[in-house]
Image (cartoon, rainbow, N blue to C red):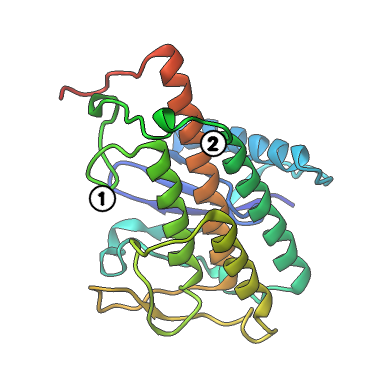
Amino acid sequence: MKHQVGLVTYESTMHSWVLDLPGCVTGARDAGELDGKLPLAIIEHEAWLRKHGEAFEPVAGWEIVETVDGLSLAATGGEFCFQAERAPLACEDLERGVARMEYARSDLMAAIEALPDAVLDWAPPASAYASFDAWAPGVRTIREIVTHDLQLEVYYRDGLRDGLAKGILERVEDPATERQRTIQLLRSLDDRARSRVYRPVRPSRDAAEDWTARKVLRRIISHERMHTAEISQRLAWLLLGAPVVRAE
C-alpha cells in the first residue's frame, strides 16, 4: 500500500497533502519538483512522529488519488475538502489526531519558550519576503505569528457547524485555553457528527465551505507545524542575517 496524496493545483504552484498522514504537506512548482520534495516531506513527517514516541511501519511510495483545481475555489476563499476527508472518523483515529495536534503545540511552545520580548516583537525586513499573507499585508513578529496560529485554530474548529461561522481574525485567549476548547469540541462529536460534512459560511462570503472532523485535524496540524518552522527560521535569521529576495 502506498501513501494516498491529494493534490491541489494553482497557476504556478501545487500543494500535495498526504491524506494518511494528516498535516503532512509540501509545495512545488511542477511535477518534477514534487517528485523530489514529497518523499522528503513524508520522511520528515514520519521522523517527527517518531520523535514524539509513535511507532509504526513505514509505507513505501505514494500515489495521487485526488486532484483539486485551486483556481476554482475563489468563492470559498480557497477552502476545499478532499473526498477522503468525508469518510467517517473512528474514535481511535480522532484520538490519534488529537495526540498529533498536541505534538505540534508542544513544538510551538518549545520554540518560543524563554524568548525575551525584544525577540518576540522583532520583525525582519520586508525585503526578506517575496510576498505576504493576504490576511497580513506586512511582516509579522513572532508574537503575531503565535496569535495568527491561534486565530486559525478558532477558524478551523468553527468549521464544524452549519450556517454563520467565525472568521479568520477573531479575538483569542492563551494557547492552553484555545487548545482545550478545540479538544473538547472534537471529543464531544458523536459517531454521526464525526461522519458528516458541515457547511459553514464565513463573514463577508456567500458560499458555504465544506468541513469535516478529518479536515480540521489536517489543517490544525499542518498550520501549526508550518508556523513553528517559520519561528525557527526567524531565529536563524537573527544569527545569519535575513535574506534579500525583493527590493523594498
Image position of 18 with respect to 31: above or below: below
Residue 112: mark? 2
Q: Residue at x 62, y 47 (%)?
A: 104
**Nearer the N terminus, badge 1 or badge 2?**
2
Residue 141 visible in the shown view: yes
> How far, Cα to Cα, is label 1 from label 2?
25 Å
Image position of 69 with respect to 223: above or below: below
* Three-letter code, disc 2: Ile
Label 1 vs label 2, nearer the camera: 2
Screen quadrant of the C terminus: top left
Q: Residue at x 29, y 25 (%)?
A: 128
User: Of all residues shown, which one is farthest toward the front?
Assistant: 117
The residue singled out by tag 1 in the image is 134
Q: The residue tagged with tag 1: helix, strand or loop?
A: loop
| Mark 1 neighbour class, 10 Å CA radius: few under 14, some 14 to 19, many 20 or more | few
Nearer-the-camera pick, 145 or 193: 145
Residue 65 visible in the shown view: no
User: Of all residues shown, which one is farthest toward the left?
Assistant: 248
Image position of 12 with respect to 248: above or below: below
Residue 41: mark? none
Q: Position of residue 151 (x, y in %)?
A: 42, 59
* Three-letter code, disc 1: Ala
Q: The residue tagged with tag 2: helix, strand or loop?
A: helix
Q: Position of residue 42 (x, y in %)?
A: 63, 40
Image-quadrant location for residue 80: bottom left
Q: Position of residue 130 (x, y in %)?
A: 26, 31
User: In screen coordinates, is 98 left or right of 108?
Assistant: right
Q: Residue at x 28, y 52 (%)?
A: 135
| Mark 2 neighbour class, 10 Å CA radius: few under 14, some 14 to 19, many 20 or more | some
